[in-house]
Amino acid sequence: MSILFDSPPIAFVSRIPDTEAQQWLIVLNTLLPDNEVCLFDSLTTRQKQQCSLAVVANPDPAELRQLPNLQWVHSTWAGVERMVAELSVADSLVNDPLIKSTAFPIVRLIDPTLAHTMAEAVLAWTLYLHRDMPAYRAQQSAAQWLQRPYIAASERTVGVLGLGKLGALSAERLHANGFNVLGWSRHDKSFENIQTFAAEEGLSAMLAQSDIVINLLPLTDQTRGLLSTARFAQCKQGVSLINFGRGPTMNQADLITALGAGIVSHAVLDVFYEEPLPVNHPYWSHADITILPHISAPTSISSASKIVANNIREYYKTGRIPEAVDRQLGY
């Protein structure tokens, strides 16, 4: 038997460009004809009091506090570490017991399309490193005609850090294209055709065998600064790195030192401590770093909106909130 709910406005709370926010509104309102999804700034004081649900994209905690009756929020992003951290800081700064805590459930986006997009990017940039594209680009700048030795994909070992949905599909895509693939996760996992490792000892063993290491780990207390001097020392000499996970997983100064020492030969970076990457950051001018503007797995508004809308419809039908983020883990 369905539970009947009133349908107050659904707030869309974000710090994304207005043009992008408007695209979300158009699609969500089309998919949710019985509800009204409104930009936060367009809500009246009374409507803010009525809101029990918000769709969010990098929201300002101060705005979420103005929705005192929120029951849960649905993120349009797969990664919610920044949001969790900002809400935690905001709560710690409030001493007034009358001000509502922001400890409501956070539901992150789980979109199968995202995993396929990430797997595509992982394969593309692994091939970039595998076929020596950074070296050929440098040769072009120096007007050098030099053919480098070819190495078969089967002779190249790629290690994937993180075997969640994104990592598992990425590892499978790499294997399907002939690479020898290893995978690491916090806990034991098993996949056909992929040798897996777990825990501290497993991480060291995987790094020692990998020619290319790809980070797809979420940002947690355990992964912050994980890729540092100590880890680079466990890698093969001349290892290449791809960071498509989170910027703070990799220690910036240690990476530059490792590149200078030849421990790391090249790094493809799509995520950073601060985004956009500041114009004076040393990464920009480093010959052995390829910078991407956080494009490895962009959210598809079309597919993501369908998932968000389905979850919202189910909530109004049954009263059940979808599986929420573990705030301690950050995902």
Image (cartoon, rainbow, N blue to C red):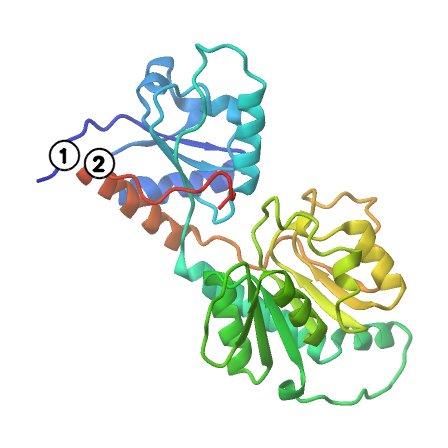
Count of numbered marks:
2
The location of residue 120, given as percent across then percent down, is 53, 69
Return the residue found at the far front.
201
Q: Which residue is mark 1?
A: 3
Q: In the drawing, does residue 286 fall left or right of residue 242? A: right
For the point 66% across and 56% down, the residue is: 270
Indicate the quadrant containing the N terminus: top left, top right, bottom left or bottom right. top left
In depth, the one of 151 and 236 nearer the eye is 236
Q: In the drawing, does residue 328 fall left or right of residue 273? A: left
- Indicate the quadrant where residue 95 lies: top right
Q: Which residue is mark 2?
A: 319
Label 2 Cα neighbours within 10 Å, binned few <14 / some 14-19 / many ≥20: some
The location of residue 321, given as percent across then percent down, is 29, 39
Which amino acid lies under the numbered mark 2 shown in the image of this protein? Gly
Tell me, yes or no, whether the two marked residues, 1 and 2, touch with CB atoms within 8 Å: yes
The location of residue 192, given as percent across then percent down, is 45, 79
Please determine whether, in this image, residue 322 is positioned above or below residue 118: above
- Indicate the quadrant where residue 309 lies: top left
Which amino acid lies under the numbered mark 1 shown in the image of this protein? Ile
**Does any portion of residue 87 appear in the rendered image?**
yes
